[in-house]
Image (cartoon, rainbow, N blue to C red):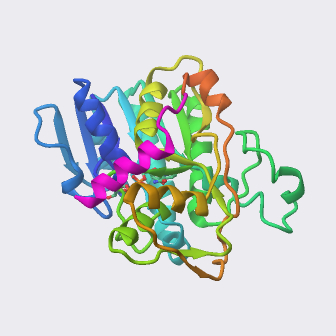
């Protein structure tokens, strides 16, 4: 049995679908705050849905009972929300994660995978930042010192540290995956905090002009959801990976002009963007070194940006 916390959300529901297709039994624990029942794979005798909150220890213990692997994805996922309400962020992302670790330890779970984030790195490439000159032209490795800029990022650093500590102190096998910019079907374009890809696609489909904040030369390391699902499956079984942290990305940077160019080709539209002032706090460049994940997890991303964007656009059109 595999438990996916946050399994009704974007990433969790895609992992659930893949596991069910492989014949695994899946339990989903979700409070449906941002996730929806619509995301859940159709009815299956191997799918169990628990509506509940990771802030409640008893719920976590019930969810972890009889489970082999925990894929811990439940979280408050919005950086601006975490800035508005750091206490709520702390309760869900730190206390909730600790609850799941204790429940997994006590239930004798084989391994817990923690969904971390590239937000832990902060902005190593901002002009004027201490690390700007040194690191602007190098991808981020797991050895780069975390420099969180939001309560959300702090909570991911703390979650990773708890995972490492639980490996060392209690021999609970844990792995943290630092996702970069994940995109794909089921990512919500309507959310106030939507990510750039679903937002751009939804805007272009309505024949409107997408907004680029700043000069558009900022870069991101986008990774398609299918590759993230594969990283999770590999992380469940990889040997010699316990207690470690891994970047999960494509290892390639794409700027917003290139992204828009690709989307215009796929959607066959010729719409130009509106430019607005750069938003304070936006990270300039984000680019991962993924050699550690390749070495220990055997992870190599296989989905091209074009393929991923086409699949996402097709889903959003529906
Ligand atoms: N999407 C990305 O690009 C990205 C990047 C880095 C890290 N992550 C991490 O991956 C994980 C999944 O993100 P996502 O993009 O699928 O977000 P999402 O919001 O779609 O999924 C999160 C899920 O957790 C559930 N949830 C929230 N609070 C809960 C609580 N207290 N108890 C139980 N369930 C709760 C939500 O209802 C939702 O289904 C998160 O931990 C997120 O921080 C995502």
Q: Quadrant of the N terminus?
A: top left
Q: Residue furthest bottom?
A: 277
Residue 125 pos. (x, y %)? 78, 59
- Residue in the foreground of this view, choosing between 218 and 35: 218
- Residue in the foreground of this view, choosing between 200 and 123: 200
User: Looking at the image, in which quadrant does ligand 1 appear?
Assistant: bottom left
| Left or right, 14 with reference to 118 | left
Give the vertical position of 220 relative to 24 (above or below): below
- SS assignment for the magenta stretch, majority: helix
Give the vertical position of 282 relative to 7 (above or below): below
Give the vertical position of 93 relative to 291 (above or below): below
Residue 309 shown in magenta:
yes
Q: What residue do we see at 28% from left, 53% from top? A: 315
Residue 66 shown in magenta:
no
| Residue 186 appears anywhere in the view | no
Residue 222 pos. (x, y %)? 54, 49
Q: Which residues are magenta?
A: 300-318
Residue 311 pos. (x, y %)? 35, 47
Quarter-wise, where is residue 269 in the image?
Answer: bottom left
């Amino acid at each position: 049995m595999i438990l996916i916390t946050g399994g009704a959300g974007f990433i969790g529901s895609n992992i659930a679908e893949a596991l069910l297709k492989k014949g695994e039994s899946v339990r989903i624990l979700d409070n449906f705050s941002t996730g929806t029942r619509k995301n859940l794979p159709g009815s299956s005798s191997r799918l169990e849905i628990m509506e509940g909150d990771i802030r409640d220890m008893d719920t976590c213990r019930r969810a972890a009972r009889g489970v082999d692997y925990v894929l811990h994805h439940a979280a408050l996922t919005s950086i601006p929300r975490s800035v508005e309400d750091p206490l709520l962020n702390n309760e869900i992302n730190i206390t909730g994660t600790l609850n799941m670790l204790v429940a997994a330890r006590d239930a004798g779970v084989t391994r817990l995978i923690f969904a971390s984030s590239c937000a832990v790195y902060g902005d190593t490439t901002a002009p004027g930042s201490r690390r700007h000159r040194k690191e602007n032209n190098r991808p981020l490795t797991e050895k780069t010192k975390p420099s969180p800029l939001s309560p959300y990022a702090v909570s991911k650093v703390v979650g990773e540290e708890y995972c490492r500590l639980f490996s060392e102190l209690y021999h609970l096998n844990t792995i943290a995956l630092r996702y970069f910019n994940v995109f794909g079907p089921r990512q919500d374009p309507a959310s106030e905090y939507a990510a750039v890809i679903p937002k751009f696609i939804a805007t272009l489909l309505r024949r409107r002009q997408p907004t680029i904040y700043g000069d558009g030369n900022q870069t991101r390391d986008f990774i398609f959801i299918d590759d993230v699902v594969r990283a999770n499956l590999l992380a469940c079984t990889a040997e010699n990976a316990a207690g470690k942290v891994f970047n999960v990305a494509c290892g390639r940077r794409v700027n917003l002009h290139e992204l828009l160019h690709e989307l215009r080709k796929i959607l066959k539209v010729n719409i130009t963007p509106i430019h607005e002032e750069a938003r304070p706090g936006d990270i300039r460049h984000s680019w991962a070194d993924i050699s550690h994940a390749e070495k220990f997890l055997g992870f190599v991303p296989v989905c091209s940006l074009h393929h991923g964007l086409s699949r996402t656009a097709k889903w959003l059109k529906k």
